[in-house]
Amino acid sequence: MDRLALGARCILFVGLAFLAVWVQVTLSHYRQNFHHKAMWSPVISSPIYSLAAIWIAISRPDWLLSVFVFLMWFGVLTGTAGFYYHFHGVGLRVGGYSMRNFLVGPPVLMPMMYIAISVLGLIAYYWR
C-alpha cells in the first residue's frame, strides 16, 4: 500500500471519528443545557472537521488540504481548552478532585480524545 492511499484512509478515519465525537459531545453538552458558551465550540467544529476530512479522503482538493491543517490545529487548541474546562469542572464539584468526581463529573478524557484525533489528522497530512 503506498503512502498516499494510507494517508487518505487515515484522514477518512479522522473524518469518521469526528462524526462519532460530534454525536457524543452534542448529547453530553445538550444534557448540560450548554451552560457555558465554550460548549458550543466542539458541537459546531466537529462536523466541519468531519466533512473536510471525508471530502479530502474522497477527492483531495489541494486548497482544502491547507484548510484542513488549520482546522486540525484549531482542534488541538479547542481540545486543550476543553481539557482545562473539564478538569476545572471536576474540581468545582463538592469534594474537589476526588475519584468520585472524576467518575461522575465532566469526562476529562473526552477533550484528550479530541486532541488525539486532531493530532492524527496532522500526522496524516504531514506524513504524505
Image (cartoon, rainbow, N blue to C red):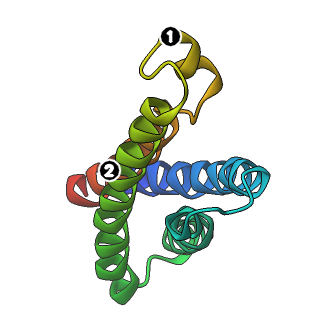
- Kindly indicate whether the residue at mark 1 contacts the one at mark 2 (C-beta within 8 angstroms): no
Q: Amino acid at mark 1?
A: Met
Q: Residue furthest top?
A: 99
Residue 6: tell me if it is visible.
Answer: no
Question: What residue sits right under mark 1 in the picture?
Answer: 99
Q: Is residue 67 above or below residue 14?
A: below
Point 29% across, 56% down: residue: 122
Q: Is residue 56 above or below residue 36?
A: below
Q: Which of these two is toward me, 2 or 108?
A: 108
Nearest the viewer among 1 and 9 is 9
Q: Is residue 26 left or right of residue 66?
A: right
Q: Which residue of the protein is positioned furthest toward the front in this rendering? A: 94
Nearest to viewer (mark 2 / mark 1): 1
Residue 92 pos. (x, y %): 47, 36
Q: Position of residue 93 (x, y in %)?
A: 54, 31
Label 2, residues with CA under 10 Å away: few <14, some 14-19, many ≥20: some
- Is any part of residue 82 visible from this angle? yes
Q: Quadrant of residue 104?
A: top right
Q: In the rendered view, would you say 76 is above or below 58?
A: above
Tell me the residue at 67%/63% (across/down). 34
Q: Position of residue 4 (x, y in %)?
A: 35, 57
Question: What is the quadrant of residue 84 in the picture?
Answer: top left
Q: CA distance from mark 2 to mark 1?
A: 22 Å
**Element class at badge 1:** helix
Q: Rate crowding at label 1 as few (under 14), some (14 to 19) or many (20 or more) other CA atoms within 10 Å.
A: few
| Residue occupying the point 74% across, 60% down | 33
Left or right, 24 with respect to 102, comes to: right
Q: Nearer the viewer, residue 48 or 7?
A: 48
Left/right of residue 17 with respect to residue 71 in the rendered view: right
Kind of residue indicated by mark 2: Thr
Q: Which residue is mark 2?
A: 80
Task: In the rendered structure, find residue 30 and report the number of the disc placed on it.
Answer: none
